[in-house]
């Protein structure tokens, strides 16, 4: 009897799933307190920094990537059952403010916000007491009141859910964070624009995506500009909450002691760091106080009282805010590393050159080795790196709908799987959500519809196809503009005269002969010129590199020898006439699949064949389908030879086959 080969990866997956089912069944038998203890233990098992979460009572806590398949499987199961949310909802074990929000009556919520603000000084957006009310995390799943409305709120019966929209807008106006994330990284978009989306949840997702575009301003020093009210231009202040109905943010102007609501395009962050409170939001330790019981306490710095010269410091352990002089505040040595955890970072200056420039998500800091773990999605692995080799990825400010959870997922993954056309229209057509975001298992929305051919004909598949064509058109226009506008050697703008072209490839442009000679000798054009010329003039395919299939041989026996070889001029095409072919590619050492619209010309073209590398490169450079396929022109000569033109590669709206 033949022994079946064991797929150990599948065994691991099944073992993880079975253990998760055991966890789920066990959780249902426990009290709420015991559930929370069990969940904390599970979170710790797949690398969650519980201490960071505990010390960040109204922030996102540890949002580092979950690096292992087993860990992601466990996190996915925890999210699917809601953790301790069902038990907390049933027993109403939330804070009074969260309960008021879930009750669905806006008036009490507004009153509670106003009551807290009445005891605080402006700017409110820098006051930890208000942050604790608006963004305080509830349950072991760490949901803010805003997240609770669209997670636990789904379980609340007999409530008009449209009132949750009103309450959500109240929270955002007061300064609640629209980009809050729970313990596995889920945002309002994950909860509101997925499989269970409704018109009401999509409404608040729309609002939160807009609010999140400028949420980084909240609590920061800003300057006003471009206003019709000239006396306000140039005024500095502190940005606050977001008004969803008007699209404006509040700004408290100190020297006027006045709050104004301003369009976001009229607000600019102050870049001069000497004017910013550099301690704000930092995790610190108290030291040198007369009250020795307070020395060594850890806290988070809030607002600065310029009159008293003291910083507000929230002490999570005591759940209270104290006002401390700057000299009594100590920033831990590990603070820079602790602040990087969960952030998008870029690696640089490493001896392993292949890692330099790689982007990843910072994880936990090991104080003994003085290194920070970084998960690199592209390589699906975790590396430990010194702090000096890590920098914040400034390009990583994302749309809220592009923010990944700790598994790497965005709501669009779920939208594709469930063919939710309404969600796709909001995310893709209104907010330009990326179709290229891959989870940490390597699956992205675009890849999902390309890898399953039938998915391209679903409602969401057609929307994504439309996006790919728009992206391709923009990419090719930008590429063409660059090629036709600058000297290939010195990068000087060629303006309207267009410069001079290389006489051989007739593609590369120069500002003059000196640059052309230098680029030929030193710039590498000598090596690329032949390739560029081939792309423009065309490459003749060779019959020696066509892969023949058994099904073609069978067809030839039944229908005649003409069916043995489908490498021939397509029906309706004349010799010398150009027609369109589709080229589908995998790895460079794999055959290309090539066919025309009628499929009377179809073949698999083997590696090393003339034109293979040129066509493969064009397919890989095509952004529309993630480097898997492209279209280009071809022609057939009078003497039965096929010429392809890689230089014509691209996606057109009329190419729908």
Image (spheres, helix red, strand yellow):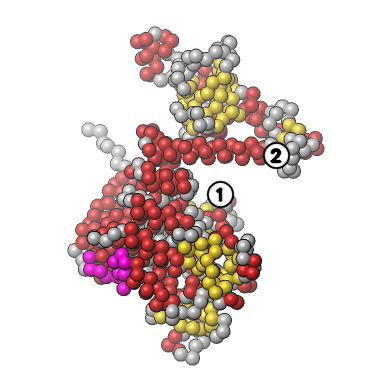
Residue under label 2, please give it.
485
The image position of residue 39, as x and y in percent, is 30, 64
Q: Which residue is pictured at 48% across the width and 24% down the height?
A: 594
Residue under label 1, please give it.
354
Q: Which residue is pictured at 29% across the width and 54% down the height?
A: 80
Camera-nearest label, 1 or 2: 2
The image position of residue 521, as x and y in percent, is 75, 36
Is residue 270 at least partly visible in the picture?
no
Tell me the distance, in whole angstroms, between the alpha carbons under discs 1 and 2: 32 Å
**543 sits to left or right of 483:** left
Q: Is residue 76 magenta?
A: no
- Say how many tags the image has: 2
Out of 361 and 151, give the one closest to the viewer: 151
The image position of residue 404, as x and y in percent, is 43, 54
Q: Is residue 98 magenta?
A: yes
**10 sits to left or right of 460:** left
Measured along the vertical axis of the image, is residue 242 above or below residue 502? below
State which quadrant residue 320 falls in: bottom left
Q: Quadrant of the N terminus?
A: top left
Q: Residue furthest left?
A: 29
Q: Which residues are magenta?
A: 90-105
Marker disc for residue 320: none
**467 sits to left or right of 13:** right
């Amino acid at each position: 009897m033949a022994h079946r080969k064991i797929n150990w990866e599948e065994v691991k997956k099944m073992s993880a799933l079975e253990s998760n089912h055991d966890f789920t069944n066990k959780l249902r038998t426990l009290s709420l307190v015991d559930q929370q203890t069990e969940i904390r233990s599970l979170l710790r098992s797949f690398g969650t920094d519980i201490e960071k979460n505990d010390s960040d009572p109204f922030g996102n806590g540890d949002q580092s990537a979950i690096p292992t398949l087993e860990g992601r499987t466990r996190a996915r199961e925890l999210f699917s059952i809601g953790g301790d949310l069902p038990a907390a909802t049933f027993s109403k074990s939330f804070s009074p403010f969260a309960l008021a929000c879930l009750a669905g009556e806006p008036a009490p919520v507004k009153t509670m916000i106003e009551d807290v603000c009445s005891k605080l000084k402006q700017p409110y957006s820098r006051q930890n007491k208000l942050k604790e009310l608006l963004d305080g995390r509830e349950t072991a799943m760490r949901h803010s009141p805003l997240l609770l409305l669209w997670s636990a709120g789904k379980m609340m019966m007999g409530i008009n859910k449209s009132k949750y929209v009103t309450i959500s807008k109240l929270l955002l106006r007061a300064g609640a964070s629209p980009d809050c994330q729970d313990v596995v990284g889920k945002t309002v978009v994950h909860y509101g624009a997925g499989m269970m989306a409704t018109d009401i949840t999509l409404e608040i997702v729309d609002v939160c995506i807009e609010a999140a575009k400028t949420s980084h301003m909240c609590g920061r020093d800003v300057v006003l500009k471009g206003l019709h009210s000239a006396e306000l231009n140039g005024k500095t202040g502190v940005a606050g909450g977001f008004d969803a109905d008007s699209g404006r943010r509040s700004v408290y102007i100190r020297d006027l002691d006045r709050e104004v609501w301003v369009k976001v395009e009229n607000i600019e962050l102050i870049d001069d760091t000497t004017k910013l409170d550099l301690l704000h939001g930092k995790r610190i330790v108290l030291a040198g106080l007369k009250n020795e019981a307070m020395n060594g306490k850890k806290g988070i710095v809030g607002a600065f009282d310029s009159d008293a010269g003291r910083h507000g410091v929230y002490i999570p352990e005591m759940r209270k805010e104290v006002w401390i002089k700057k000299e009594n505040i100590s920033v831990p040595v590990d603070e820079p590393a602790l602040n990087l955890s969960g952030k998008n970072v870029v690696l640089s200056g490493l001896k392993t050159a292949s890692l330099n420039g790689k982007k990843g998500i910072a994880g936990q800091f090991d104080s003994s080795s003085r290194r920070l773990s970084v998960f690199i999605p592209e390589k699906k692995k975790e590396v430990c790196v010194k702090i000096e080799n890590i920098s914040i990825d400034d390009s990583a400010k994302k749309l809220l709908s592009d923010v990944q959870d700790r598994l790497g997922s965005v709501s669009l993954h779920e939208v594709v799987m469930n063919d939710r056309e309404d969600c796709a229209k909001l995310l893709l057509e209104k907010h330009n959500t990326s179709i290229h975001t891959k989870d940490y298992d390597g699956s992205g929305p675009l890849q999902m519809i390309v890898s399953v051919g039938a998915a391209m004909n679903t409602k969401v598949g057609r929307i994504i196809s439309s996006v790919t064509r728009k992206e391709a058109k923009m990419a090719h226009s930008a590429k063409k503009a660059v090629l036709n506008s600058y000297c290939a050697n010195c990068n000087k703008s060629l303006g309207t005269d267009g410069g001079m072209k290389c006489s051989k490839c007739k593609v590369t442009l120069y500002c003059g002969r000196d640059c052309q000679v230098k680029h030929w000798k030193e710039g590498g054009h000598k090596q690329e010129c032949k390739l560029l010329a081939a792309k423009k003039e065309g490459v003749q395919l060779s019959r020696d590199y066509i892969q023949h299939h058994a099904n073609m041989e069978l067809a030839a026996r039944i229908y005649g020898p003409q069916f043995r070889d489908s490498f021939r001029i397509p029906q309706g095409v004349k010799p010398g006439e150009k027609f369109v072919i589709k080229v589908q590619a995998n790895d460079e050492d794999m055959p290309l699949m090539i066919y025309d619209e009628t499929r009377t010309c179809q073949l698999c073209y083997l590696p090393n064949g003339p034109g293979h590398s040129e066509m493969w490169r064009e397919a890989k450079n095509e952004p529309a389908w993630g480097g898997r396929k492209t279209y280009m022109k071809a022609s057939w000569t009078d003497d039965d030879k096929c010429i392809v033109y890689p230089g014509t590669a691209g996606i057109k709206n009329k190419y729908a086959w």
